[in-house]
Amino acid sequence: MSATEIRNELCKYARKTVSNKLVVGPGGNLSARHEGKMYLSPSGFALDEIAPEQWVEVDIESGDITDIGLRPSSEVLMHLYAYRANPSIGAIVHTHPPYCIAFTLVEQELPVMFPDQAALVGTTTYVPYVLPTTDRLADAVVAKVNDYSTILLGNHGLVTTGRNLREAYYRTEVVEESAKIWLIASAIKTPKALTDAEYKEIASLESEAYRIELLQKMK
Ligand SMILES: [Zn+2]
């Protein structure tokens, strides 16, 4: 994939985050890694208003920003540190999905409820509220990125990572849908999550093959 293709992919998934109401206004930020650089949403834009050439190129090792007259997202450190900490991360999606945020106000760890959640996402972790845009938030997220691909941010939102944008993006959708269903069920009584045995059974399937099959279906 070329840098141009990465920029076009970023536009595609940025539009999906807005059309699927995973962010509102200028909230959220997306990035993808390509050949030692990351391409990150610029500051002050709604995600669906970013043109392909407006994604800000940042050198992952040095942190040098290619000057195109735009500032990178204020969460630049969170993205930068995550790529440095985990070489298998190819893309990062940070959104403010309403059910995830509601969930963080009353709960912390999101239970695993569904087979596709178990296979595509696994366990979702939680970081208590930290002031956004700070290196404290970046440090808190980075402490989790080698063990989890989905991180709930207390009173704030969600960060998902993946080997590519598609994987990171669909993890966001799956976690948001799971949080939504949990909240609906918990209006009636305490919801039933998958048991450890049920979760392990999914993990013992050809889980990689299952995950790929699910991703194919989600086109
Ligand atoms: Zn945010």
Image (cartoon, rainbow, N blue to C red):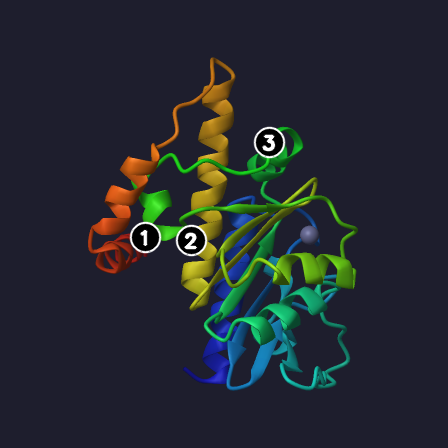
SS of the residue under disc 3: loop
* Disc 2 residue type (three-letter): Tyr
Residue depth check, mark 2 versus mark 3: number of the one nearer the observer: 3
Label 1: how many residues lie within 10 Å, few (<14), some (14-19) or many (20+)?
A: few
Q: Is mark 3 within 8 Å of ligand 1?
A: no
Count of marks placed on residues = 3
Mark 2 and mark 1 residues within 8 Å of each other at the beta carbon: yes
User: Residue 107 shows which numbered tag?
Assistant: 3
Q: Residue at x 20, y 50 (%)?
A: 205
Name the image quarter holding the C terminus: bottom left
| Residue furthest out toward the top | 188
Spatial CA span between label 3 and label 1: 28 Å
- Residue at x 73%, y 44% (from the top left corner): 129
In the figure, is residue 195 to the left or right of 177? left
Residue found at the far front of this picture = 197
Say which amino acid is labelled 3: Glu
Q: Quadrant of residue 105?
A: top right
- On the image, the x and y values in percent for residue 106 come to 63, 28
Q: Which numbered marker is on residue 170?
A: 2
Foreground mark, 3 or 1, reads 3
Identify the mark nearer the N-term, 3 or 1. Answer: 3
- How dense is the environment of label 2, judged by Cα within 10 Å: few (below 14), some, or many (20 and up)? many
